[in-house]
Amino acid sequence: MELTKNIFFNTDKLTPNSKVKISYTGKFFQDNSEDVYIHYGFGNSWENLTDVKMEKSDLGFQIEIDLLDNDSLCFCLKNGNDEWDNNDGQNYVFPIEHVETDLIVVPEDSFAMTSPRRLRKSYILTKKIKIAIYKVLRFLPKLVSGNYKKKPEGEN
């Protein structure tokens, strides 16, 4: 998923307490920089600030990070020459989406099997019909071609 030009994630949504792989194909990758570092934190105040060297590949510079339970992921990038890519002074800021579980109602006994269920008669009948059709389709060509011979009554 591309959220911003030259920044890609391996997921559609950033969710808390999960891992995300970030790929960067921006100006440092295009300029063939050898070392690129990601400087990232969470929320407006950049909590849990971390600097990590990214791995270079044919697909760009990549890293996998753990997302914390916060409202946003903020980062900028720098190369080995202390040049920064901070999205023209805006930094790269992406929302972390929290899944709403308040609206999900699961009855307590929904997974409990109170009584065994019987197969419907129509289901059993359709199974019998399918088996009969299979047998006819399998043995009819042998009967027509003469390759099917009955065993004599004495043989088993």
Image (tube, rainbow, N blue to C red):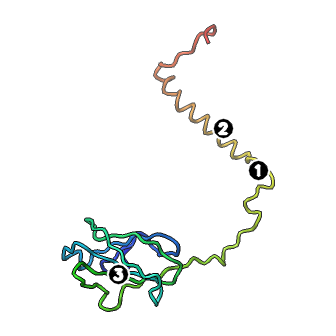
Q: Judge left or right: residue 57 versus residue 141.
A: left
Q: Is residue 58 left or right of residue 104?
A: left
- Tell me how far mark 1 sits from mark 3, CA to CA: 53 Å
C-alpha distance separating marks 1 and 2: 20 Å
Residue 96 image offset from top left, x and y in percent: 49, 80
At label 3, the amino acid type is Thr
Kind of residue at disc 1: Arg
Instruction: Name the residue located 70 percent from the left edge and 73 percent from the top edge.
Output: 105
Describe the element under mark 3 as helix, strand or loop.
strand
Q: Is residue 156 left or right of residue 72?
A: right
Q: Which residue is mark 2?
A: 128
Image: 133 above or below 8: above
Crowdedness near tag 3: few (<14), some (14–19) or many (≥20) residues, C-alpha within 10 Å: few
Residue 129 spot, x, y in % from top left: 64, 39
Residue marked by disc 3: 4
Q: Which kind of residue does numbered mark 2 sit on? A: Lys
- Mark nearer the N terminus (2 vs 3): 3
**In percent of the image, x 52 and y 75: which residue is there?**
16
The 10 Å Cα crowd at callout 1, few under 14, some 14 to 19, many 20 or more, is: few
Question: Which label was assigned to residue 117?
Answer: 1
